[in-house]
Each structure stands twice: as C-alpha cells, then as structure tokens.
Image: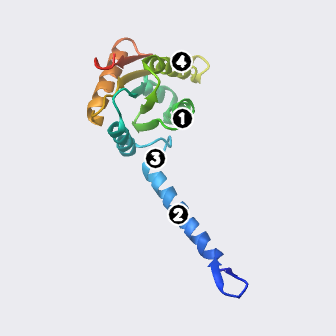
C-alpha cells in the first residue's frame, strides 16, 4: 500500500486502496455481464432481453417507430443432424456475430434459446427503413456458408410496437409473423404494422 503525503507529511491518499476498489468493481461488472448473457453467443439471455425491451416499451412515445424482430434459422435441426452439434453451435455464434455487427448499440439483441434470436430496434426513421433492414438481414444471412454447397437462411417475424404495449403482446404478434414467414416458404420476413401506425 503506497501512501501519498503532502508537503507537510500528512497522508493524502493510498494508491493500493484505489486499485482494490477498481478490481472489485471490475469483478462485479464481469459477474453481472455473465448473469445477463447467453453463454454460447454472448448475446443477452431471455430474462435480460425481456427486461430491457420492457424498459424500452415503457419509454416509447406516440409517433416513434420501434419494432421487435424474432428470427429462427431455417431447418436448424438438419444442420445439427447432418454436421453435428459443434457445427450447429458455430452457426449460432456466426449468426450472433452478424447480428452484433449489423445492428446499432442502442438496439437490444438476445438469444432466448435454441436457434431463436430476438432484436428490438429503437428509434427507427420510418417503416421503409425497417423493411430495408429486414431485407438486408435476410440477405446477409444467406451469405453464411455451412459448406461449399450449402448456405443458411432465416425466417423473420417483425412487429411494430405501440405505446403502452406489453412485451408479451408484442412478442406474440412477432411470433405469429414468424410463423407466417415459415408458412410462406421461409427465407423471408413478415411484418405486422398496427393500423394506427400505417
């Protein structure tokens, strides 16, 4: 412990104590980070995603455009069955990295489990910007290769949020849109826009 003294010899502060506080703070932040993250992809886990999205919904104002995206990797089970679980995990990590690189830091990106991912997009310019983002996301995923002859695709369900909406109701709408995308042939997105916003 180094004690720093002033001109009269009185102790002013101790450097060792400052280091200990910094170390404790870093350890607490690391533990909190681990508790909030999915261990495989390092995206937010179910509980943290839900909590952050609920906060965003609480702050949503009339006239603002925000949206929840729910996506599944198409035929993910066949990737695991054909190439093994290690390749399946690598695919999940690759998609997670793509999401991290293609969305803003203000957006909330999570992995509830399995091959499902969720993204809550905040403060969108307009619906055209949202549609363009969804199309670009589908296209970016198409470029991920499993092997030389096989690429992956996603099905994406999107729901535009309304002020006062709960997480549960928004998720249900996005999930229904996801199943519509699957029913329409996969490798696509379906968007639900409330009548009040159109």
- Residue 116 placed where, x, y %? 40, 31
Between marks 3 and 4, how big is the CA–CA gap? 27 Å
Q: Which circle, 2 or 1, is nearer the viewer?
A: 2
* Mark 2 Cα shell of 10 Å, populated few (<14), some (14-19), many (≥20): few
Vertical placement of residue 110 versus 129, above or below? below
State how far apart marks 4 and 2 are (Cα).
Answer: 41 Å
Q: Secondary structure at mark 3?
A: loop
Q: Residue at x 48, y 20 (%)?
A: 129
Q: Nearer the viewer, residue 59 or 158?
A: 59
CA distance for labels 4 and 1: 16 Å
The CA span between labels 3 and 1 is: 13 Å
126 with respect to 161 (left or right): right
- Mark 2 vs 1, N-terminal side: 2
Q: Given this view, does label 4 or label 2 mark the residue nearer the observer?
A: 2
Report the Cα–Cα distance between label 2 and label 1.
26 Å
Q: How is the image coloured?
A: rainbow
Image quadrant where one finds the N terminus:
bottom right
Tag 4: Cα neighbours inside 10 Å, few (<14), some, or many (≥20)? some
The residue labelled by disc 1 is: 100
Q: What mark, if any, has residue 139 been given in the picture?
A: 4
Question: Where is residue 124 drawn, in percent x and y?
Answer: 45, 26
Q: Residue furthest bottom?
A: 9
- As rendered, which of 148 and 9 lies closer to the eye? 9
**Residue at image mark 3:** 37
Q: Which residue is mark 2?
A: 25
Position above or below: 17 against 30: below
The residue nearer to you, when weighing 124 against 1, is: 124
Q: Secondary structure at mark 4?
A: helix
Q: Earlier in the sequence, mark 3 or mark 1?
A: 3
Distance of label 2 from label 3 (alpha carbons): 18 Å
């Amino acid at each position: 412990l180094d004690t720093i003294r002033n001109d009269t010899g009185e102790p002013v502060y101790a450097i060792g104590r400052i280091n200990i506080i910094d170390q404790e703070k870093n350890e607490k932040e690391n533990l909190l980070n681990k508790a909030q993250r999915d261990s495989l992809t390092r995206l937010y886990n179910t509980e943290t995603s839900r909590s952050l999205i609920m906060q965003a919904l609480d702050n949503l104002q009339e006239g603002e455009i925000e949206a929840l995206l729910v996506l599944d990797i198409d035929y993910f089970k066949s990737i695991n069955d054909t190439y093994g679980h290690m390749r399946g995990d690598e695919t999940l990590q690759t998609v997670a990295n793509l999401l991290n690189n293609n969305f803003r830091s203000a957006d909330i990106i999570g992995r509830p489990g399995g091959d499902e991912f969720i993204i809550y997009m905040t403060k969108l310019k307009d619906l055209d910007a949202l549609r363009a983002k969804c199309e670009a996301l589908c296209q970016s995923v198409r470029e991920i290769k499993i092997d030389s002859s096989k690429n992956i695709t996603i099905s994406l369900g999107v729901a535009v949020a309304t002020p006062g909406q709960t997480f549960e109701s928004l998720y249900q709408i996005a999930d229904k849109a996801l199943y519509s995308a699957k029913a329409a042939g996969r490798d696509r997105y379906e968007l639900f826009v409330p009548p009040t916003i159109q």
